[in-house]
Amino acid sequence: MLDPSFFSYVTVMSITPGPNNLLLATSGVNFGLRRTLPMVFGILVGCALQTALAGVMLEVLLHWMSQIRLPLTVLGCGYLLWLSWKLFRSSAPEMRENARPMTLVGGALFQAVNPKAWLMATNVALLYSASSGVLAVMLGFMVMNLPCILIWAVMGDRLRHHLQVPWKLKLFNGVMAISLVITTLWMFIEAVKMA
């Protein structure tokens, strides 16, 4: 049986702004909800696999976490800054020949370098896997995470209709890129403080 605090924790961590949600909103704006759904499910699968991995490998993670936290954060933050730059420089999707949203596999693999997702998966495993079991935690996580991340893709899709003017879309992508940079810097500073 999952502790009620599990549902609260997963909901808060899943719905608050972070790399996944900023990218989902941006993809919803640029490509619409239907084309963003593979990314939504990729993030869902990637986060669930992280949670299972963290639960199964808890002993190893506790030993290694202090050693790998900073290098993993630096790698993840570097990737997020690169994504921010790509977002900032992007133009309207119809103006680009090869524009396409992140795939299911891309969304899942993105979790490997997403510091917020690792923090969430590790905390869920630490707090709930021992008492509830890894499978129950992973399934509960997926049930709670999906509506939270889907909201961001839907919000992006709804904004899409208001951002058809190229300068408005460019402004939106710029604001999202800057938000991602700020989020990245905040995560990096927190990781350095903990190191």
Image (cartoon, grey):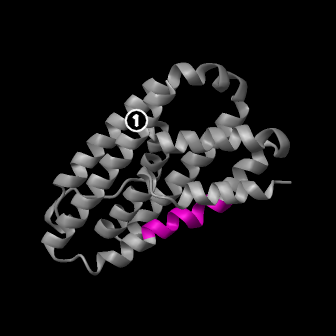
Residue 121 % position (x, y): 61, 42
Label 1 neighbourhood size at 10 Å, few (<14), some (14-19), many (20+)?
some
Choose top left, top right, bottom left or bottom right for residue 33: bottom left
Which residue shows up at 65% across the image and 35% down it? 53
Does residue 179 appear left or right of residue 148 in this picture? left
Residue 143 % position (x, y): 67, 61
Quadrant assignment for the N terminus:
bottom right
Region in magenta: 143-153
Which residue shows up at 43% across the image and 67% down it? 153
Say if 11 sits above or below 166 in the image. Answer: above
Circle 1: element type: helix
Does residue 57 appear left or right of residue 12 in this picture? right
Q: How many marks?
A: 1
The secondary structure that dominates the magenta segment is: helix
Residue 75 % position (x, y): 38, 30
Evaluate whether residue 136 shows in this view: yes
Furthest residue to the front?
193
Say if 7 sits above or below 63 in the image. Answer: below
Choose top left, top right, bottom left or bottom right for residue 76: top left
Residue 191 % position (x, y): 46, 32
Q: Is residue 152 in the magenta section?
A: yes
Q: Nearer the viewer, residue 18 or 169?
A: 18
Does residue 90 appear left or right of residue 112 in this picture? left
Choose top left, top right, bottom left or bottom right for residue 79: top left
Q: Nearer the viewer, residue 52 or 184?
A: 184
Q: Amino acid at mark 1?
A: Phe
Q: What residue would you read off at disc 1?
A: 188
Evaluate whether residue 92 shows in this view: no
Q: Is residue 10 in the magenta section?
A: no
Which residue shows up at 18% across the image and 72% down it? 168
Which residue shows up at 65% across the image and 19% down it? 63
Q: Nearer the viewer, residue 26 or 31?
A: 26
